[in-house]
Image (cartoon, rainbow, N blue to C red):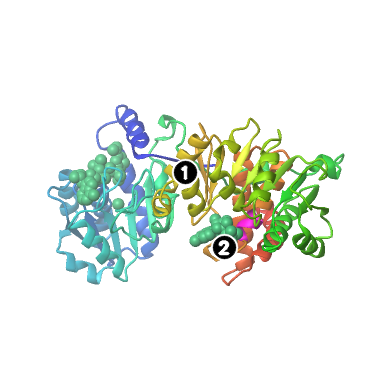
Amino acid sequence: MRTAYTADQIRAAEHTLMATLPPGTLMQRAAAGLAAACAALLGKVYGSRVVLLVGSGDNGGDALWAGERLARRGARVAAVLAGAKTHEAGLAAFLRAGGRVAERDALGTADLVVDGLVGIGASGALREPYAGLAEEANAGRAPVVAVDVPSGVDASTGRVEGAAVRARLTVTMGALKTGLLVDPGAARTGRVELVDIGLGPHLPGPDVAALTDGDVAGLLPRPGNESDKYRRGVLGVLAGSDLYTGAAVLAVGGALRAGAGMVRYAGPAEPVAQVRAAWPEAVITPLDRPSIEDVGRVQAWVLGPGLGTGDWAHELAAQVLGTHLPVLVDADGLSVVAGDRSLLRRSAPTLITPHAGELARLIRAGREDIEAARLEHARAAAAELGVTVLLKGSTTVVAEESRPVRVNPTGTSWLATGGTGDVLSGVAGALLAQGLGPYDAGSCAAYLHGLAGRLAADGAPLAAADVATAVPAAVRALTART
Ligand SMILES: NC(=O)C1=CN([C@@H]2O[C@H](COP(=O)(O)OP(=O)(O)OC[C@H]3O[C@@H](n4cnc5c(N)ncnc54)[C@H](O)[C@@H]3O)[C@@H](O)[C@H]2O)[C@@H](O)CC1
Ligand SMILES: Nc1ncnc2c1ncn2[C@@H]1O[C@H](COP(=O)(O)OP(=O)(O)O)[C@@H](O)[C@H]1O
Ligand SMILES: [K+]
């Protein structure tokens, strides 16, 4: 598990640690790690041109002390002092080592730029001259190494309110910050390297967590010797309508590929014909009225993809959410519950899988506000609705009350194509049916789906059905790597 923390959590931990050490120790540890990372990126340090963007706080101090180390190794290091004040000891040491102070035009000839404008002490959008410097660094040809966080990215949330550095590499001190894992911030970090400054023992429980291959391999249910199809987990899928047949096919496909012992599909004539043709493995109940009475026993339900939003869908939602089984609500199912949130008041686990637009309707917020602050909105929705929330999009997050938000590290923007969400519903539903709780089912499903998306795309467009097909390969790949 990779864990990440807010700026306040980091600051508190640093405070405790610092009290046990001689002054300046942490900054020296940070600078040593930063200088080593810069040297590795440069390849050849001697003679290379490094430009430091130095803000007024300790983030600038880190940059100056790293610049000092690079200058001692023969790099030509120039510091652009952007703040009203500068870390004094850092600047003195930097100058002693042969570094020089320069104007911003030094950026034009740099081989490497070090962004030490702001770190966890930043508040709000970058002000001038920081904003302009960040943009100039982004426009240049030299790679940018961000110190601790790319300046302009909110370390605690990943919010980007104005200009922000786009780094090739982010060298972060002590522990990961939440904003490095959540978009839009995560898209600015490049590779993230963690420098150990001894913070570990002083950190509290994490703010967010990201699963790894090993975590997912450990959580994924596997059939035992004694398993049979019923004991592995039977999923009921209520999806599709005479108008939208594909959603049913894709959700059932996702579920079958993610290890459900059996998938029971129930729906009207058109999607029934399509599901039957695509998936002879599914056990089908044609519905001529909205009732789950004849579907047979299941261990979990998926409700919603392509279901429609009228009386039919409402009746099915009321019945399924009235059971004591885990239910995943997606797509049209979310529109139905947005119109009648009392349906979500239940004691059994509920996992909802909205994209930003669907969540906007559910919690009456703006879609753009949700996209800009995914973490906060997913968390707030989980608390407000009393359900587990898997918010889809460029960074998928899974929020459940009193747990760190799980941030999904896999995925590819090739997944932004119609129908991939239906596949995800099937995958997550299958994991619920196999006994995972909604938090693990949602986060493992997002992980597998993202990995399957990468395998299916392999740098080129994919269709949603390809993602379902690639799910077993994703399971194999992550198992092989652990
Ligand atoms: N505290 C510690 O023990 C350690 C801190 N370290 C470094 O110190 C950093 C934190 O240092 P600070 O607390 O001094 O804070 P920062 O250096 O992140 O930023 C604070 C300064 O930036 C200015 N500022 C804030 N928001 C701004 C904005 N939007 N536009 C322009 N200027 C803005 C403030 O006026 C203030 O002077 C970390 O990110 C890390 O790089 C590391 O050296 C490790 C040890
Ligand atoms: N930019 C992106 N980067 C990575 N994944 C994305 C991006 N945009 C969408 N996705 C993923 O693609 C899927 C789309 O789901 P959804 O919006 O429900 O589409 P549909 O309803 O057409 O199936 C989700 O898993 C989502 O996380
Ligand atoms: K920075």
Residue at 62% from the left image edge and 55% from the top image edge: 449
Q: In the picture shown, does residue 30 fall above or below 459?
A: above
Question: Tag 1, which secondary structure?
Answer: helix
Judge whether residue 421 is colored magenta. yes
Residue 367 screen position, x and y as percent: 43, 53
Indicate the amino acid at tag 2: Leu
Residue at 87% from the left image edge and 39% from the top image edge: 226
Judge whether residue 207 is colored magenta. no
Residue 394 screen position, x and y as percent: 49, 57
What residue sits right under mark 1 in the picture?
Answer: 363
Which of the 4 quarters of the picture holds residue 471? bottom right
Residue in front for this viewpoint, 45 or 436 = 436
Q: Which image quadrant shows ligand 1?
A: top left
What residue sits right under mark 2 in the picture?
Answer: 415
Residue range highlighted in magenta: 420-424
Q: Main secondary structure of the magenta part?
A: helix
Residue in front for this viewpoint, 429 or 475 = 429
Q: Is mark 2 within 8 Å of ligand 2?
A: yes
Question: How would you rate the neighbour count of disc 2 (Cα within 10 Å): few for under 14, some for 14-19, many for 20 or more?
Answer: many
**Is residue 267 found left or right of 210 in the rendered image?**
right
Number of numbered callouts drawn: 2
Residue at 39% from the left image edge and 51% from the top image edge: 369
